[in-house]
Amino acid sequence: MQRIFHGFEKIESVGEFFRESNLSKGQALVKHVFAAEEVRDQGKTLVQAKCVSQVKDNVTYDVRLEISQHPRTVSAASCSCKAGISGKCKHAAAVCCYLNQEERAACTGKPQQWGRPRGKPQRDMSTKIRDIFPELINLQYIISTEHCHTALLQA
């Protein structure tokens, strides 16, 4: 038995299994899919995944896809949603679209994400302390040190 959690092979002819309307709705739900797992055992391939409801964030649906091997197509599907008995609902389509995404590259294939500046600072660093703390307007002096850019001292 072989279990695959990422790097899924593309599923062909998805449009032949799902109606166009459910396929386009499924494409919009791709980011709701998680915990996808493909299990290959004795020539059979089963994909299991979860899909968060589009309406209620605390509801997840269990989706199962049976995949034929040559060509790799959906042979059967089921979902725990009301429309999922036939397996042709938008949640099952979302799982197929998720598996077919090509932009999910391995971490080593992407530029380094840590240690990079976030972009624009959240506030302007040239703002005067008196503008930030107007209630402390009665300050007698502000001291700058080499370890701390500014220190507030009251008399």
Image: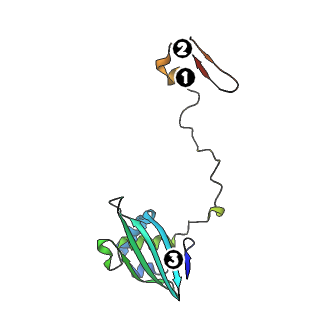
Q: Position of residue 4 (x, y in %)?
A: 55, 75
Task: Pick the quarter of the image with the C terminus.
Answer: top right
Q: Residue at x 55, y 22 (%)?
A: 129
N-terminal of the pair, mark 1 or mark 2, is: 1
Helix, strand or loop under label 3: strand
Q: Position of residue 131 (x, y in %)?
A: 51, 22
Left or right of 49 in this view: 86:
left
Render colour scheme = rainbow
How far apart, in angstroms, are the residues tagged by discs 1 and 2? 10 Å
For disc 1, the marked residue is 129
For disc 2, the marked residue is 139
Q: Position of residue 22 (x, y in %)?
A: 36, 72
The amino acid on which the numbered mark 2 sits, given as a three-letter code, is Leu
Proximity of marks 2 and 3: CB atoms separated by less than 8 Å: no
Q: Position of residue 33 (x, y in %)?
A: 44, 66
For disc 3, the marked residue is 38
Q: Is residue 104 above or below residue 12?
A: above
Helix, strand or loop under label 2: loop
